[in-house]
Amino acid sequence: MKLRSCFCFGIPLFLSLFLLISTSTSPNDTSFIRKTCKKCAQSDPNLSYNFCLTSLQAAPNSHRANDLRQLGKISIKLLGRNLTNSRSYIKGLLKNKDKTDPFVRSCLHDCLDLYSDAALTAKQAIRDYKAKRYDDSNIDVSSVMDSSTTCEDGFKEKEGVVSPLTKRNNDTFQLSAISLSIINMIRLNDD
């Protein structure tokens, strides 16, 4: 009887210790993401460490990334999702015809075109990245980054106009900067 009670007590204790040890060394450890974001922010003064960290930690499967190549792929996919989401947001703004200034409406149409092209370019960037054509992927992501800047600049052409896309354009710029930094780190490591 005494052996049986020890056995029943021992299994839950063993399982608890096993789970504690396995979760403390699991891929949920974000130190790799933190280190990568620190390097990215140091190499680009326009890139926010906190934005990088928050974005990559929130990305699906980022906690499983154990090398720079995996994290780079995740960052480009995150950029693509951002572009798709921003396109939907712009379409929603354009549906509100009565309350939108004609100049702003024109800018929104331009931004929709820019973001539509950028979404296709991001898909090409991920294909180039997977094929280890890092120079091509770099050019693709740089083009996406330019799209966000061009979109934002369009609203500045008329004095007093406030862009309804400033945050989204900034996010796209930052996500592009993260991807570019990681691509460049990989390129330097491959040389």
Image (cartoon, rainbow, N blue to C red):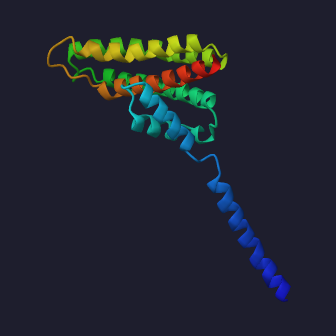
In the picture as drawn, the residue positioned furthest to the bottom comes out as 1
* Residue found at the very far left of the displayed protein: 160
Residue 162: x and y in percent read 21, 23
Query: Of 133 and 184, which appears nearest the observer?
Result: 184
Q: Image point 62% across, 55% down: which residue?
A: 24
Up the image or down, 30 lies above or below 157; here it is below
Quarter of the image that includes the N terminus: bottom right
> What is the quadrant of residue 101 in the picture?
top left
Image quadrant assignment for residue 43: top left
Side of 143 where 170 appears, left or right: left
Q: In which quadrant of the rendered view does residue 151 lie?
A: top left
**Quick one: quadrant of the C terminus?**
top right
| 106 left or right, relative to 58 | left
**Residue 34, percent across and down?**
50, 40
111 displayed left or right of 74: left
Residue 37: image location, x then y, percent: 48, 34
Viewer-proximal residue, 190 or 150? 190
Residue 85 visible here: no
**Is residue 5 placed above or below 153 in the rendered structure?**
below
At 85% from the left and 84% from the top, the residue drawn is 3
State the residue at coordinates (63%, 13%).
133
Q: Depth check: give the residue in front, 36 or 161.
A: 36
Residue at screen point 30% across, 25% down:
166
| Count of numbered tags | 0
Residue 159 is at least partly visible in this image: yes
